[in-house]
Image: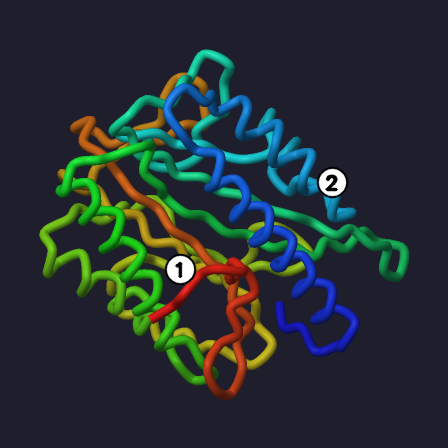
Amino acid sequence: MILTAGADIALIKEAGKAAAAVLEELIKIVSPGVTTWELDEFAERSIRAWGAIPTFKGYRNFPMSVCTSVNEEVVHGIPSKDRVLREGDIVSIDIGATYRRGCEGAQCDFIGDTAVTVPVGKIVPRLEKLVSDTQRALYEAIKVCRAGATLDDIGGAIEDVATTAGYGIVREYGGHGIGFNYHEDPFILNYRSGSRVKLKPGMVIAIEPMFNQGGDRVRLKQDGWTVVTQDYKPSAHFEHSLLITEGEAEILTKRPSEVIS
């Protein structure tokens, strides 16, 4: 979908700002002994304090407000009172904030969608590098995003970082368009596929590289949501929502203290 109305663009920017601010506060409370359930409770309270609603809660019957994926979990992990974060873990936190408005008799959602992977206490250097490289892949992909760039430009920027560092690339999941619905076309692969689909001004997209310390392959757990690496090696995941312009893309979910290089 292409956003052109000033009011629509303002709302989706506000949704991105809310998601970014809440995620920044969530990062601060990640520590050994904290449960992923506690992260979820904090996130829901904070999102609603912004006057927004948690995007994920109830989406295709997902039961919680954020996704928390620990170590070998790639994406869509379900927060639990039983999942206690431990020193040396890494945890991906994926969050969405929605402003919902009526528009011409229909429901229109304006969504900010973003994710980070953060250490729990002190982690080993190899995990530090996995996390750092995955974030760098996101930033490299953002640099190529402007009107006229192709989906393959995005996938190629991400793939180049993974290939150089020797990581597996998650191939079944990737980025996506965002419009009045949470997931819209185009689906954005994290590797080259030959796609010549071009970005246009006003498009809102989410880019989300996922790198595995082992191979590419992943599988879905019995809960129907949590995706894990097939070889049970750690995975990292980062995401930002972007508004495409004629020049540099506007990062809608940039966190207040985030420095992008």
Q: Is residue 190 left or right of residue 27?
A: left
Q: Quadrant of residue 253?
A: bottom right
- The picture places residue 259, in percent across and down from the top left corner, at 40, 65
Instruction: Look at the picture and state if 141 lies above or below 54.
Output: below
Residue shown at 27%/53% (left/top)? 134
Look at 23% across and 55% down and name the residue there. Answer: 133
Identity of the residue drawn at 63% across and 73% down: 2
Q: Position of residue 247 (x, y in %)?
A: 48, 87
Question: Can residue 195 be seen from the camera position used here?
Answer: yes
**Residue type, label 1:** Ile
Residue 144's place in the image compared with 70, above or below, is below
- Tell me the SS state at disc 2: helix
- Front residue of 124/5: it is 124
Q: Secondary structure at mark 1?
A: strand
Label 1 belongs to which residue? 188
Quadrant location of residue 153?
Answer: bottom left
Camera-side mark, 2 or 1: 2
Determine crowd level at label 2: few under 14, some 14-19, many 20+ residues with C-alpha closer than 10 A. Answer: some
Quadrant in which residue 184 is drawn: bottom right
Left or right placement of residue 233 versus residue 197 in this view:
left
Residue 214 on image: x %, y %:
14, 38
Cα–Cα gap, marks 2 and 1 = 29 Å
The residue identified by callout 2 is 48
State the colouring used for the structure image.
Answer: rainbow
